[in-house]
Amino acid sequence: MITAIVLISAAADRIPETAQEIADIDGVSQVYSCAGDVDLIAIVRVASHEDLAALIPAKISKVDGVVNTDTHIAFRSYSSADTGTAFELGIESA
């Protein structure tokens, strides 16, 4: 499974509608509205790079209100639970 984080600039007057349309696309697991340099962040999970290549330009970029996208592919996932477990490896209790 490939996870990508898609940073999306959107037309200010269409942010809620744009976010919902993106959230309804197969392969998009979450969409967040946010403050900062971008308006929306979409988390995309697909089976292959080909699926990702088709999803971003053919679907997400075509949603009314999307001005620009910037895609980042995730290599590894870290969570606070994973980090805690990693630090416990090799530690033996006496």
Image (cartoon, rainbow, N blue to C red):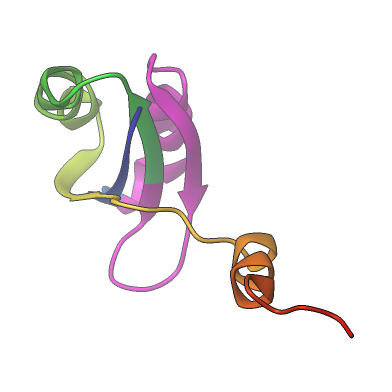
> Which region shows up in magenta?
12-41
**Quadrant hosting residue 1:** top left
| Coordinates of residue 42 in the picture (x, y in percent) | 39, 42
Q: Is residue 29 above or below residue 11?
A: above
| Between 83 and 29, the one nearer to me in the picture | 83
| x 19%, y 26%: residue | 52
| Residue at horizontal 41 percent and vertical 27 percent from the top | 28
**Residue that extends furthest to the right in the rendered view of this protein:** 94
Identify the residue at the far bottom of this view: 94
Q: Is residue 90 left or right of residue 4?
A: right
Give residue 94's position: percent from left, percent from top.
89, 85
Which sits in the foreground, 75 or 71?
75
Residue 25, percent from left and from top: 38, 17
Q: Is residue 24 above or below residue 70?
A: above
User: What residue is drawn where x is 59% and y is 61%?
Assistant: 79
88, 32: nearer the viewer: 88
The residue that appears at 19% across and 17% down in the rendered structure is 51
